[in-house]
Amino acid sequence: MALNKFMHPRNIYKTPPDFSNLAKKYKEFSDVAKVDITGKVSIDFKDPHALRVLTKCLLKSDFNLDVNIPEDRLVPTLPLRLNYILWIEDLLIAINKNNSVSGIDIGTGACAIYPLLAVVKNKWNMLGTETDEASLMKAKDNIEKNKLQHLIKLKKNMSTSIFECVFMDDNDQVFDFCMCNPPFYTNIQELLESRSPARPAPKNGFTGSPHELITEGGELQFCRKIIAESKIYKDRILIFTTMVGHKYNLKELILDLKADSIEHTTTEFCQGRVTRWGLAWTYKDYHFSNLVVPKHKSRKKNAPIVITLPDLPGPENDINNCLEKIKGILLDLKIMFKVINKRRNEITLSIIAYNNTWSNQRRKRRLSKQSSEIQSKQPKQDLEIQEPHVNEKLKHRDISNEEQISALRHTEVAEEIISKPSCINKDKQEIIVHGIMKFFMKDNRPNVELEYLNGKAGKEGLHQVIQYIKNNWK
Ligand SMILES: C[S@@+](CC[C@H](N)C(=O)[O-])C[C@H]1O[C@@H](n2cnc3c(N)ncnc32)[C@H](O)[C@@H]1O
C-alpha cells in the first residue's frame, strides 16, 4: 500500500479496510480470508475470486450497495474509483456547481461502478454508456438491484462515436461533466508487457475481459477521440474528464489541449502500488488554476532528461530527416520501436530493447577488424576448418589474456548483432530497456527528451542508447 498516503485526502481507503471486521460481518468474506499466526486477517490479492468478494463486501459495508461482479469482467478497485469521484467533486466545487449535478460515465462496465458510487455519495444524476451488450445487461441488473433506476440511466453505444448516443435523441440536456476509464491497451502483447520486470510482481490478481482493456490505438487514440468530439459537444458538457493509465499518453494529451489553448488541469490518482492520472478540460470560462491538486510534492519524480544532438549535415536538418536517421540507428541496434506521435516539429517513439546491442561498440569494432585480419591471413582450407575457433587462432598469436577473453566475448556478441529481428523471441526474453524518446527541433537543432519506463538495464540503459545514437549521429 506504498502510495496510500498520497490518496485523495477525503478517500476513506486512506485507512485500509478492517479485514477482521469484514470477516465477522460477511460469511462470503470469511470464506476467502486467511488468518496468520499473529491473528492478522488478510486475503490472497492474486486470487481474482478473493478480490471480487472483497470489492463486493466493501461496496455493501461502506456504501450499502449490493453489486454482482461477473466472473469474466473487471473487478473495480474501489480506492481508485473513489479517487476519481472525489476529484470530480473538487472540479465541481471549483466551478461552484453544487446541486442538481448530472454526469456521463463513458464505458460504464458491468458494475456501473462510477454511477453507483456517484449516486450513493452525492445523489448526482448519471448516464452510463457501454458498447458491450453483456456488460450493459449486468449493469442494468446492478442498478435495479439497488433501486437506483431513477438516478442512473444507461445507453448502448452502437456507433463509432463516443457521444453521439448520448445526444442522439436531440434533447437539450446539458451535463456538468463526463468521466471515463478507457481501455488502456492496443493489443494483448502490450497488455502483457505493460509491467516492468524490474518492479515487484503486481500485488493484485489480473481481472477483466479483453474488450474492457483493449481498444484500437489504445487509450491515447480513445482519449484523443473524446477530445476531438468534445469540440462538437462543448456546450453540452461543462467539464470533460478522462482517466489516463500511462503517463506518456497524459503528456501527449496535454500537448493536444495546449495546442488548441484549451483550459485544462490534471491530477494523480494514487493507491496501492498503482498511479493513474486524471485529465479535465473545458470550453467554458472556468479556471482550474485554483484547484488544489491532491498530490504529494516531495514524491520522487521520473523527471525527463533533454539532450541536444549534433546538427545533421546538409540543409535538411529537420524532424523528418531526424526520424529517418533514428530509424536507421534503431534498426541497426535491433531495437524495436513504434512512432506513437508525430507533430509538425516533434516525433515521439516508444522503444523496447530485448538485447544490449549498444555497449562496447568500439571494442566490438576493433575485435571484428582483428578477427577478419586473422581470417584473411589463414589459408582457405584452414579457415574453413577453423572458422568456429577464432579464439584458438588468437591464442597462437602474441596477444594478452584480456584480448583473448574480449575476443571470446566478441564472437558471442557478433552473433547477437547479426541476429535478425525475427529471432527476437519477445515471449522468452526480458526487456532490457523500455522508454519513450521524444525528438523535437529547438533553435533549429535536434533535441531528444528521454523518459525511462522500465527494463532490466534501468535508466542508465536508456542513457546508453541515446549516447550511442549521439555518437552515430552523422
Ligand atoms: C476499462 S473498462 C471500464 C469499466 C468501468 N467504467 C470501470 O471503471 O470499472 C472500459 C469499458 O469501456 C467500454 N467501451 C469501450 N469502447 C466504448 C465506447 N466507444 N463507448 C462506450 N463504452 C465503451 C468497454 O466495453 C468497457 O466496459
Image (tube, helix red, strand yellow):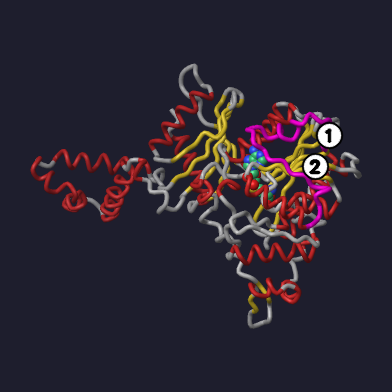
Q: Is residue 11 left or right of residue 229?
A: right
> At label 2, which amino acid type do we have?
Gly
Q: Nearer the viewer, residue 99 or 412?
A: 99
What residue is disc 2 on? 103
Looking at the image, can residue 6 be seen? yes
| Element type at mark 2 | strand
Decide if residue 246 is in sight here: no
Point 80% across, 37% down: residue: 239
Q: Amino acid at mark 1?
A: Val
Picture mark count: 2
What residue does disc 1 label?
174
Q: Which residues are magenta?
A: 146-175
The crowding category of the residue bearing disc 1, from other C-alpha atoms within 10 Å (few below 14, some 14 to 19, many at least 20), is some
Provide the secondary structure element on which disc 1 rests: loop
Q: Quadrant of the C terminus?
A: top left
The location of residue 170, given as percent across then percent down, is 79, 29
